[in-house]
Amino acid sequence: MIITVTPNPSLDRTIELSGPLARGAVQRSLSTTDEPGGKGVNVSRALAASGADTVAILPGALDDPVLVGLRARGVSTVNLPIDGRLRANVTLTEPGGTTTKINEPGPDLQGHALALLDLVVEHAGAATWLVLAGSLPPGLPDDFHAGVVHAVRETYGSASPRIAVDSSGAPFRALIDSGVVVDLVKPNAEELAEIVGGDPAEYESDPARAVEGARLLLARGVGAVLLTLGSAGAVLVDQQGAWFAAAPKITALSTVGAGDSALSGYLLAETSGATAPRRLAQAVASGAAAASLPGSIVPTLDQTHPELVTVDAVAPAVAGRR
């Protein structure tokens, strides 16, 4: 079973505009969709849509639209009751695929950090993978993800689940600086650059440079790095090697949740015993399939086409080459 933890879930409303976004103007929409959201929630939704066993852990009341929506989509949930509603995020999509996101901060969880951590630790023993994903709401410390990893490792020892983290900014830096053992991280180019330096655009245009940057995370104790590079594809780096997969050509309708679907695709392949190149191919195929769907709709497994993804081994970059 794959358990996801989303400290800052949301109701994601996607509005498809009839034309380019124009500031200060009145515009018409072609459609509006509401989906439960937040990175971990999206991973669980994608896993459930593909028939995988998953549980989403998140704060929120049982009658909150996010939890109601998850149960309606066949996703099992474990909730930490809180007062008030979860946040709502709005995404505006233009005909050419450009998206504009407006994210609320989320409810203040000050005083709930220990209860949420304990809830995760209580259930983590049943997981093969534990996924900590997304931003942190007001009231949770930057080292929350790191604290969860430490508590799970301390509680379960060698029986701990494998742990994947998809975060950014101060929480991601706190995780890496903490030295806790993480089996997989899934940054994008900008998030990688925030931690190890370098140019995000260069990472996206040069797989060798992307691998070089990802290896800096391995040197700090991370087991593997799935580095998503937007429309360029992704690289996977672990102790055994490094691989690049170019993204297939698609007509992008919305990039919301594409990275989350990529992570779910990787986990689906990993739990089925796939090799590293095949895990990467499935990740890229799942991300591309998500981007070709409207709003934050997640693809089913049969909507992905890993057989169309070419994966190549990547040698380390040559020192001094630019």
Image: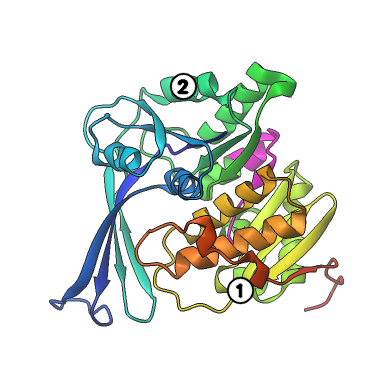
Residue 143 vs 184, above or below: the answer is above
Q: Is residue 162 above or below residue 299?
A: above
The correct choice, above or below, for 267 with respect to 33 in the image is above
Residue at x 77% of width, y 79% of height: 322
Q: Which residue is mark 2?
A: 119
Instruction: Name the residue type under label 2.
Output: Leu
- Is 176 on the left-hand or right-hand side of 117? right
Circle 1: element type = helix
The amino acid type of the residue labelled 1 equals Ala
Q: Residue 110, how many percent across, how many down?
A: 35, 27
At x 40%, y 68%, the residue is: 254
Query: Where are the magenta residues, as a range?
Result: 175-189
Q: Is residue 184 visible?
A: yes
Q: Which mark is residue 309?
A: none
Quick one: 12 or 316, which is closer to the camera?
12
Residue 259 horizontal/vertical position (percent):
52, 58
Is residue 179 within the magenta segment? yes
**Horizontal relation, residue 106 to residue 281: left or right:** left
Q: Tag 2 or tag 1, which sits nearer the N-term? A: 2
Residue 246: x percent and y percent?
A: 66, 73
Q: Residue at x 31, y 77 (%)?
A: 94
Quickly name the residue at label 1.
232
